[in-house]
Image (spheres, rainbow, N blue to C red):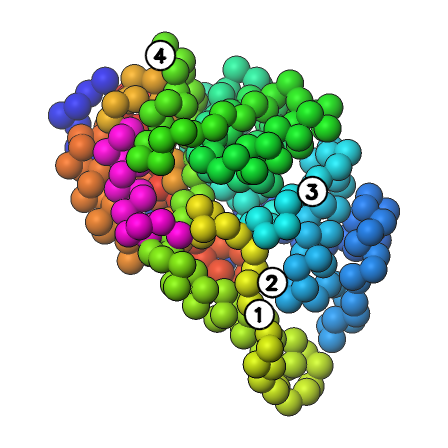
């Protein structure tokens, strides 16, 4: 490992579209999805464009769509999450997996690594276990998921147990110390090819509630525009019902930047056991501070990989202490 080498920052410049290998880039084949998961049929609507879609403001519709996507594209027999837990958008989550595959391919003669000897650690795997599901089916990678929430751990374990394609490639560990991210999870002499994480990005429960309110209002506005109706405010609407997520999933002290800074600091302790550390960064204004921290802790190399889904832009940061 070279510790005196200047880190290089490489941004993946791309048009605002999904990854070229993302199976969701051409939209939702509703007929096939309803066949894979008949419960989705109840929520299908005709959009103004003439195409079939769902009402994304309805949590049960979004949950049914997720289940259908995971069954149709990723070999699951069943998928469910407990009430009130985060229901993630599958297409965007797939882009993160493909982005990691691209990084690994750079040190693999540009060949995509599709084998179980690739081991990933999903920090905060959640009740939905979305990244291990996508990564294990698409590339055959082995995953360990960790979470501090007992219900999430139980839910992820059930998903692994009930889906034969997932069972041999996915295991879950409970984090018992909220002050640690990798500690207690990565065992002595254990090695991972990469870690990944979708960190809580709000600073408080109040911030999370305001974020849900804004998202709910945006979806309502779009729905009324599509239907050509004048918007009326419904004071009885509870956005928490539409956008689920426990406090561990949505917020932490200091928010996203503080969490990522903690992750960078703790990664130093495991720099010989992990090839690539990665983490989603939802707010672009945090990148400068993150890059400063990475340079301060003498990483050998780091990358910022841009992603896009429709008009929504996001990115993840990846760093390594090794020569790769």
Give the residue at x 68% y 52%: 63
Q: Nearer the viewer, mark 1 or mark 4?
A: 1
- Contact, mark 3 vs mark 2 (Cβ under 8 Å): no
Q: Residues within 10 Å of mark 3 (few under 14, many from 20)?
A: some
* Residue 307 seen in the current view: no
Q: CA distance from mark 2 to mark 4?
A: 42 Å
Mark 1: few/some/many CA within 10 Å (<14, 14-19, 20+):
few
User: Do tag 1 and tag 4 residues touch (Cβ < 8 Å)?
Assistant: no
Q: Which residue is mark 1?
A: 238
Residue 137 bears which disc, if any? none
Alpha carbons under labels 1 and 4: distance apart? 46 Å
Residue 31 on image: x %, y % = 84, 53
Q: Are marks 3 and 1 in contact (CB under 8 Å)?
A: no
Q: Which mark is residue 80?
A: 3
Q: Nearer the viewer, residue 6 or 47?
A: 47
CB within 8 Å, label 2 to label 4: no
Range covered by the magenta-colored residues: 251-267
Mark 3 or 2, nearer chain start = 3
- Left or right: residue 243 compared with residue 10: right
Is residue 120 within the magenta segment?
Answer: no
Foreground tag (2 vs 4): 2
**SS at badge 3:** loop
Relative vertical location of residue 122 with respect to residue 317 in this rendering, above or below: above
Looking at the image, do the residues carrying marks 1 and 2 touch, with CB atoms under 8 Å apart?
yes
Q: What is the quadrant of residue 203 in the picture?
A: bottom left
| N-terminal-most mark, 2 or 4 | 4
| Alpha carbon distance from label 3 to label 1 | 23 Å
Tell which of 191 and 139 is nearer to you.
191
Residue 52, position in %: x, y?
Answer: 78, 64
Q: Look at mark 4 in the image and give the residue it sits on.
A: 188
């Amino acid at each position: 490992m070279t510790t005196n080498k200047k880190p290089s920052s490489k941004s993946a410049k791309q048009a605002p579209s999904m990854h070229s290998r993302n199976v969701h880039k051409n939209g939702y084949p509703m007929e096939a999805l309803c066949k894979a998961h008949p419960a989705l049929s109840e929520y299908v609507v005709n959009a103004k464009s003439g195409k079939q879609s769902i009402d994304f403001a309805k949590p049960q519709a979004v949950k049914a769509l997720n289940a259908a996507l995971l069954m149709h594209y990723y070999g699951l027999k069943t998928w469910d999450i407990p009430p009130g837990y985060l229901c993630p958008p599958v297409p965007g989550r797939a882009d993160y997996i493909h982005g990691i595959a691209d990084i690994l391919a750079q040190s693999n003669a540009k060949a995509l690594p599709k084998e179980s000897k690739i081991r990933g650690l999903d920090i905060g795997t959640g009740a939905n276990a979305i990244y291990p599901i996508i990564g294990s089916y698409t590339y055959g990678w082995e995953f360990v998921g960790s979470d501090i929430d007992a219900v999430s751990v139980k839910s992820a374990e059930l998903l692994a147990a009930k889906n034969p394609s997932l069972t041999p490639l996915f295991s879950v560990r409970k984090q018992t110390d909220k002050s640690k991210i990798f500690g207690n999870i990565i065992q002595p002499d254990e090695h991972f090819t990469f870690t990944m994480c979708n960190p809580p990005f709000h600073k408080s429960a109040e911030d999370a509630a305001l974020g849900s309110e804004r998202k709910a209002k945006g979806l309502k506005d779009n729905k009324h525009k599509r239907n050509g109706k004048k918007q009326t405010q419904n004071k009885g609407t509870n956005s928490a019902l539409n956008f689920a997520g426990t406090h561990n999933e949505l917020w932490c002290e200091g928010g996203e930047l503080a969490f990522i800074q903690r992750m960078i600091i703790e990664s130093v302790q495991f720099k010989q056991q992990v090839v690539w550390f990665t983490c989603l960064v939802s707010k672009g204004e945090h990148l400068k501070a993150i890059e400063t921290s990475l340079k301060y802790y003498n990483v050998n190399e780091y990358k910022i990989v841009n992603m896009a889904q429709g008009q929504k832009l996001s990115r993840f940061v990846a760093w390594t202490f090794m020569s790769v």
